[in-house]
Amino acid sequence: MFGWFGSGGDYKTFTPGELRDLLREKDGARVLVDVREDHEWAGGHIPGAVHVPMSRFAASVSKLPKDKKIIFYCQSGMRSRNALNQAKKLGFQAEGHIGGGISEWRRHEMPIAR
């Protein structure tokens, strides 16, 4: 089941398999956000993700929907926790992040878009 981590509120830490299953639902209830920088995004990202780099997060976060749950990811999980906490403070439905980031996603041989 989902893991929990608290810092400014509880949120879910998804495994790659849990996230894969959520993304298969395609119900439009969630948005997956990659907070890595441009060169990292260009090297491959999770299919269906939107790109909001941490270096431009404060200026770009307002473009995210407030009526959907948001799941963040980065390379290893550190920046995504930061983005998650910032988004929660701004009133977004920040649901969680991928434990281990895209590195863990790749380790489980999940699909990558380029």
Image (spheres, rainbow, N blue to C red):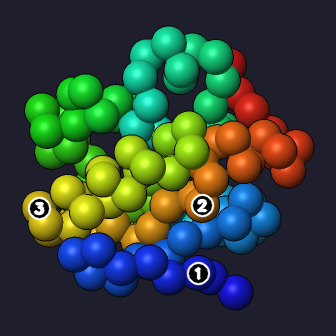
Q: Quadrant of the N terminus?
A: bottom right
Name which quarter of the figure residue 98 lies in: bottom right
Residue 39 point in image, percent of width and height: 50, 12
- Image side of residue 109 versus residue 22, left or right: right
Circle 2/circle 1 CB separation < 8 Å: yes
Q: Residue furthest right?
A: 109
Q: Look at mark 1 in the image and give the residue it sits on.
A: 3
Does residue 49 show up?
no
Tag 3, which secondary structure?
A: loop
Depth check, front residue: 111 or 81: 81
Instruction: Tell me the quarter of the picture where residue 87 sits.
Output: bottom left
Numbered mark located on residue 40 in the image:
none
Judged from the image, the secondary structure of the residue bearing numbered disc 2 is: loop
Residue 61: image location, x then y, percent: 20, 43
Q: Is residue 98 above or below residue 93?
A: above
Answer yes or no: is residue 113 visible.
yes
Residues marked 2 and 3 touching at CB (< 8 Å): no
* Relative side of 21 to 4, left or right: right
User: In the image, what residue type sits under mark 2?
Assistant: Gly
Q: Residue furthest bottom?
A: 1
The residue under the point 32% across, 59% down is: 84
SS of the residue at dot 1? strand
User: What amino acid type should be assigned to the residue bearing mark 1?
Assistant: Gly
- Pick the quarter of the image with the C terminus: top right
Residue 58 percent location from the top left of the image: 14, 38
**Residue picked out by circle 2:** 99
Q: Amino acid at mark 3?
A: Leu
C-alpha separation, residue under disc 2 versus residue under disc 3? 22 Å
Left or right: residue 31 versus residue 15 is left
Q: Earlier in the sequence, mark 1 or mark 3?
A: 1
- Location of mark 3 (residue): 90
What crowding class fits label 3: few (fewer than 14 Cα within 10 Å), some (14-19), or many (20 or more)?
A: few
